[in-house]
Every structure is written in structure tokens, then in C-alpha cells.
Image (cartoon, rainbow, N blue to C red):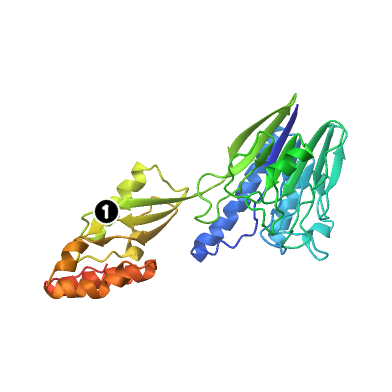
Amino acid sequence: MLRILHTGDVHLDSPFSGLDPTFAEVRRNELRAAFTSMLHYARCEKVDMILIAGDLFDAQFVTRETLALIKREFESIKCPIIISPGNHDSVTESGVWKRGVFPDNTYIFTNDSLEYFDFPDLGVRVWGWAFTSHTMESSPLVGRRADGEGINILCAHGDMSSARSLSCPLTVGELEAFGADYAALGHIHNPKEYTERIAYCGCLEGRAFDETGIKGALDVTLDGGRVTRKKIRFSKRRYECASLDVYGADSNTELASRIGEFIISEHYGDDTILRLTLTGEVSPSFAVNTAVLEKASDRVFALKVEDATSPMLGSDELRRDPTLRGELYRVLEPALTCDDPREREKASAALRVGLAAIAGESVELG
């Protein structure tokens, strides 16, 4: 039986540029903490090897603090650690991979051709390659077959999502023809299921709203020709996207209350970075203040609110209205129905202000 911890797409030293600078620094530290937690798991569970399938670092430049962390954590691991550098942390002459700073239990692929490391004590041969630039237009697997005695493992960074990918395009057919007992892949952060023997680990920690949900690594067991995988959470936070119908709302105070109730009902908590889109019809004299709403909730780690509401008066009614109200709507209708969400938002706000002014009402802006 062979037990593997399969990880990749860690992206240490990510800038988290989409967050407030204070939150971004917190997230960088939490990413390091997730990485440390994963290696602590590997030690406690006594896995036989750790496979890092590319993009351990977010860029070729690595901070001194992160490099010290890597060295310290790798030295505390007894099993071999095999790394296939990816498109973000590709191998260059001046890069981190050729500095000789990693401990003896670390095995790093440094060429863009297919190579292998043998581990006789485990009866395992691990195949892989490295990105040597930000792009890799073809797969090193073409025409090759795993021929090591015992167990053959592939640890590699590549893209199964597009045959035209510039990040080492791979296909199920190529991988199956290669014949590895397990293909540990990296690059796809939100992976789908492929086969029992072919898997992406996904990213260790979500970094943006296109990486939603709980993240982690794969605990993989190979036993008598059978492969079993278990997803283990190591992420400290999770990104989530949701929408909330706020029909009839007429104040930001009411909206804040509804948002709080929604967060509770969905069991979001301090581990959640939430993007919430508000939908539905609201009072025409009310303007949603997203900045106020984003600061109103302390139930999640961070809240991003997007306004996709519309004035409560029906568009058909306004379009037929012969008075100034109808004329205002007809002038704004092209912008209200265009494809640009920013233009729609500005037109919607203008309609609310205009309708309120015609009715002699005030508009709540905050």
C-alpha cells in the first residue's frame, strides 16, 4: 500500500490584490498557515510521499520569509517531497529551484522533458517535468509510456481544459496511454472529476471569487491496483457567491437586516469571503448604498455587495405613461436595458432620483 499527499497550486506569496490591504496581509499569512497545516497533517498521518504538482509559489520571486518557512517545514518531513514547477513558478537559471536551498528529501523536476525519480524503498517511480517559462505549448507525454517496475506515478502541471492551452495541454487519452498508476495533476483550481487514476488536487486556499468553496489537498491511497482519494480541507477561508432577492426594500437599514438574516440562514461565518448580489424590485425613491452595507455586517470575514435591483414600478407601466414620469423612463430605457452593468446601475439610480423628484419625495442615498 502507498499513501500520497497530492497538492499543488498553493501560490505562496500571492498578493490578494482584490482585498483591502489589511485583509490582504491577513490572507497572505493565512495561506502560509494553510500550507503549514497541510504538512503537519502529512507528518501526523505518516504519508509515504508528498507530490506538489506545480505553482507552489505565485511567481518566480519568493520572499525570504516564505523560503525560510518552506525550508523549515520540508526539513521536518521524513518522506520524499517531489515537485513539478508550474507556469507561475517556472524553472529559470536565476530562480529559486536551482539555488540548492531545499533539503535532501526534496526532488525537483527542472527540465521541460519527461523525467523520473526512483524510490526503491517504496517500489515507486515518479515521472514529471517542469515549466521552464510561463508557457508550454505541447505535452511531454506524447508517445511515452510509464515503464518503471512497481508503481508508476505522474506528478505534473498541465491543462486538460483546452487542447489549445499554452499551459501544457493534456488529454485523458494521453494520460491513459502513458499508463501511470496515478496521475497527480496541478493547474486547474476548481477541478472536475476525470477518472479514478487521474485527478487534479485543486488549489490549497481560494484567492478570488472564481475559486469558491472549501479548498485543500488530496489524501490518496494506492492498494492492490485500487486508488482511493479523500479531499482534506486546509483552507482557512472560503470564497462564496450568492444572490438575495430584496423585493420591496425601502432603506439600507432594512437591507442590512435582510443581509444579516441571509448570512445566518446560509451558515456563512468568519471563514467566509462573500460576494452578495442584491436582486428584485425596490422602492423607486430608494438608492442602495453598497459601501454602507459592506460595513454593516461583522458575521463574515469580508462582504462585497453588488446592486442588481430595479425600481418597483413596472417598466411596461412607465413606458406607456404619458406624463413626465414616462418620458424620463423612455429616455433612460436604452441604458436600463444595455449589457453594461455599470451603465444599468447608473441609469437605475437616475430613474429613482428622477421619479422621486417628480413625486416631490426625497431619495435615501445612504
| Mark 1 burial class by Cα count in 10 Å: few <14, some 14-19, many 20+ | some
For this view, does 304 lie left or right of residue 150?
left
Q: Relative to 32, is 363 above or below?
A: below
Nearer-the-camera pick, 109 or 29 = 109
Q: Quadrant of the C terminus?
A: bottom left
Q: Which residue is painted at 64% across and 53% down in the image?
A: 162
In percent of width and height, residue 65 lies at 69, 59
Q: Which residue is painted at 22% across and 56% down in the image?
A: 249
Q: Which residue is painted at 82% across and 45% down in the image?
A: 143
Res. 292 image quadrant: bottom left
In percent of width and height, residue 261 lies at 30, 47
In percent of width and height, residue 89 lies at 72, 59
In percent of width and height, residue 88 lies at 69, 59
Q: Which residue is painted at 83% across and 49% down in the image?
A: 114
- Residue type indicated by callout 1: Val
Q: Relative to 227, is 13 above or below?
A: below
- Mark 1, secondary structure of its residue: loop
- The residue that label 1 is drawn on is 246
